[in-house]
């Protein structure tokens, strides 16, 4: 009996020591996590951009990064990871540690449309591993044409395209992008037959071909083309906003041109890996909102026709993105658009 009791006592003691050691380990790890959160950030932060330099997302990211760096008192570096409709960058983010040092600047395409459009090609949807920090900006779209095309307005475009079916190439950031969907809607409404030319690196990759008239028209973020419009290398035919833009007072809206409701205004947002500590998310959110209030940022955005737009909280932004996922899923399904 004594031996049996002694054996039981040793097991009980070992079990208690194991529980104590486990509790101690979690306590130490918890204290380390708290310490890390309180000192965040203590090294450079990377902003991953899923599209090529020169486009709207890249422009927003670079202007924003400068001010965020000042608010957090640490370097914030922009890194472009281009390709596969944003999937290369998204894949890298699915493996990024949830520590607040690798962030993602996404947009309507990468974080809303792709959930449906590229669902069959993704191991995981962006919403499964990325959480919203805040919206950063909204940007109107402009229906633009190559100046070499010699067309001055939407009516002339429609007339030319009807007389020359298949002669107009329209560019977009890829199959299923909202720029492409808007053009398909316009094409159908006007009774046109045009040729789609996708550029998977974003608008920054097809501005030069448009200037040289290799592609003739596109719906493009205003920030990506405003300088080309000002220098008359591209021609603004119509804007997608409800009212005319002050910077382009002579350019009508799509509604004024006879195509009510056609055209999408873009949004850009900041995302962090899901599981990032709340204290880090809160610090990023507060620093981002402050950065978006900076007068230098506002002026830089204004020159590119970008409007700063912060969310009320990370949860509110994540909810907004999910609503966008649902809305565009319906649009894609109705048009029966699938990725190539």
Image: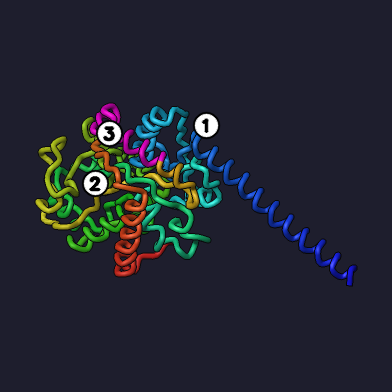
Front position among marks 2 and 3:
3
Name the outermost residue toward the front: 2
* Pointer 1 local density, CA inside 10 Å: few below 14, some 14–19, many at least 20: some
User: Considering the image in quadrants, where does the N terminus appear?
Assistant: bottom right
Q: Return the residue at label 1.
A: 42
- Disc 2 from disc 3: Cα separation: 23 Å
Q: Residue at x 33, y 51 (%)?
A: 317
* Pointer 2 local density, CA inside 10 Å: few below 14, some 14–19, many at least 20: many
Depth order, front residue of 231/57: 57
- Disc 1 from disc 3: Cα separation: 24 Å
Element at badge 1? loop
Left or right, 43 with respect to 140, comes to: right
Q: Residue at x 25, y 29 (%)?
A: 299
Instruction: Residue 316: give x, y in percent of width and height.
Output: 32, 52
Q: Which dot marks residue 293?
A: 3
Instruction: Residue 230: give x, y in percent of width and height.
Output: 21, 32
Name the outermost residue toward the bottom: 1
Residue 210 seen: yes
Question: Is residue 302 found inside the magenta-colored segment of the image?
Answer: yes
Q: Return the residue at label 2.
A: 141
């Amino acid at each position: 009996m004594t031996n049996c009791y002694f054996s039981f006592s040793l097991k009980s003691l070992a079990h208690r020591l194991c529980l104590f050691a486990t509790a101690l380990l979690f306590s130490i790890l918890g204290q380390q996590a708290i310490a890390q959160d309180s000192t965040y950030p203590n090294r450079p932060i990377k902003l991953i951009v899923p599209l090529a330099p020169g486009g709207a997302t890249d422009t927003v990211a670079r202007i924003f990064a400068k001010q965020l760096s000042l608010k957090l008192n640490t370097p914030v570096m922009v890194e472009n990871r281009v390709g596969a409709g944003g999937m290369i960058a998204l894949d890298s983010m699915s493996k990024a540690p949830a520590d607040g040092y690798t962030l993602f600047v996404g947009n309507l395409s990468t974080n809303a449309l792709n959930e449906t459009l590229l669902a069959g090609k993704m191991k995981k949807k962006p919403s499964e591993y990325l959480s919203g920090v805040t919206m950063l900006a909204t940007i109107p779209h402009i229906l633009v044409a190559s100046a070499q095309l010699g067309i001055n307005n939407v009516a002339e475009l429609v007339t030319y395209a009807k007389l020359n079916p298949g002669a107009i190439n329209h560019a977009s950031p890829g199959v299923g992008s909202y720029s492409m969907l808007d053009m398909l809607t316009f094409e159908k409404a006007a009774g046109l037959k045009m040729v789609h030319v996708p550029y998977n690196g974003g608008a920054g990759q097809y501005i030069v071909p448009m200037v040289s008239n290799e592609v003739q028209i596109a719906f493009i973020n205003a920030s990506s083309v405003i300088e080309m419009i000002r220098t008359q290398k591209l021609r603004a035919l119509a804007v997608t906003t409800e009212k005319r833009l002050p910077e382009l007072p002579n350019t009508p809206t799509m509604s004024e041109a006879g195509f009510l409701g056609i055209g999408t205004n873009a949004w850009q947002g900041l995302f962090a890996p899901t599981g990032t500590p709340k204290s880090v998310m809160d610090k990023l959110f507060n620093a981002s909102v402050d950065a978006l209030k900076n007068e230098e940022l506002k002026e830089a955005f204004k020159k590119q026709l970008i409007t700063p737009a912060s969310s009320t909280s990370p949860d509110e932004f994540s909810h907004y993105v999910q609503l966008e996922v649902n809305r565009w899923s319906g649009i894609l399904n109705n048009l029966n658009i699938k990725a190539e």
